Image (tube, grey):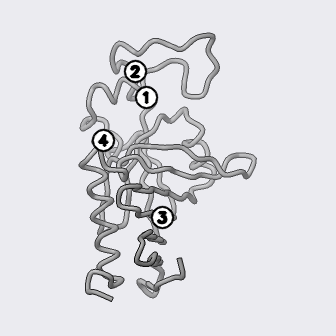
């Protein structure tokens, strides 16, 4: 095993990939899949854009429309998981933790102000996400009214599983943060 295959190196690489996902829209880590628990108790999956990552607090920032099913699901049950797979690097990352929702606060205001006009216009669409319409709606002309529907999801993860598929032997590790601190170990892939 090389120094680059230590648990500390794996954890650092996973955090680097998450940070890159925020900055590089071509990165597979830019569009992870978020899993929530629906009102019927069934899992619900959807792809979002990773907008921020704070390594110190292990918190991911995602944006969504507050009229969406995912917002309602997280308001009812904040436990969530996030998964991303980079086919080129053959690395999968699974994170789980609790979500905090931000709507009418400084966090949401700052995220809205930092968003591009094209992104903000997505929140101005009427009716809201998932509503039936007779034909595809036209793109909204601007972001007027969009702020009222905009929300921020902060997912603070306390568990991270890393899997690297490779010809010379797959590698898998888990990192779990609890009251006693970090517990990390290798797993059978």
Where's residue 95, x and y in %? 48, 64
Q: CA distance from mark 1 to mark 4?
A: 13 Å
What residue do we see at 44% from left, 49% from top? 153
Q: CA distance from mark 4 to mark 2?
A: 16 Å
Badge count? 4
The residue singled out by tag 1 in the image is: 148
Where's residue 135, x and y in %? 58, 11
- Local SS, label 1: helix
Would residue 175 be seen by someone viewing this image from the given angle? no
- The answer to whether the residues at label 3 and label 1 have Cβ atoms under 8 Å apart is no
What residue do we see at 42% from left, 22% from top? 124
Where's residue 109, x and y in %? 31, 39
Quadrant in the picture for residue 57: bottom left
- Local SS, label 2: loop
Q: CA distance from mark 3 to mark 2?
A: 33 Å
The residue singled out by tag 4 in the image is: 111
- The answer to whether the residues at label 1 and label 4 have Cβ atoms under 8 Å apart is no
- The answer to whether the residues at label 1 and label 2 have Cβ atoms under 8 Å apart is yes
Label at residue 95 = 3
Residue pushed farthest front?
A: 167
Counting other residues with Cα less than 10 Å from the Cα at mark 4, is it few (<14), some (14-19), or many (20 or more)?
some
């Amino acid at each position: 095993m090389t120094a680059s295959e230590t648990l500390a190196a794996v954890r650092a690489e996973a955090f680097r990939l998450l940070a890159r996902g925020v900055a590089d829209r071509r990165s597979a880590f830019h569009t992870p899949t978020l899993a929530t628990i629906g009102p019927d108790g069934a899992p619900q999956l959807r792809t979002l854009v990773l907008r921020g990552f704070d390594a110190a607090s292990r918190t991911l920032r995602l944006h969504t429309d507050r009229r969406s099913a995912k917002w309602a699901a997280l308001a009812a049950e904040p436990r969530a998981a996030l998964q991303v797979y980079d086919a080129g690097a053959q690395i999968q990352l699974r994170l789980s933790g609790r979500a905090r929702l931000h709507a009418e606060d400084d966090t949401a205001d700052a995220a809205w102000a930092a968003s591009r006009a094209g992104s903000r216009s997505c929140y101005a669409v009427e009716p809201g996400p998932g509503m039936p319409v007779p034909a595809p709606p036209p793109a909204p002309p601007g972001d007027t009214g969009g702020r009222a529907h905009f929300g921020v999801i902060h997912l603070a993860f306390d568990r991270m599983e890393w899997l690297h598929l490779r010809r010379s032997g797959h590698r898998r590790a888990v990192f779990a943060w609890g009251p006693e601190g970090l517990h990390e170990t290798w797993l059978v892939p």
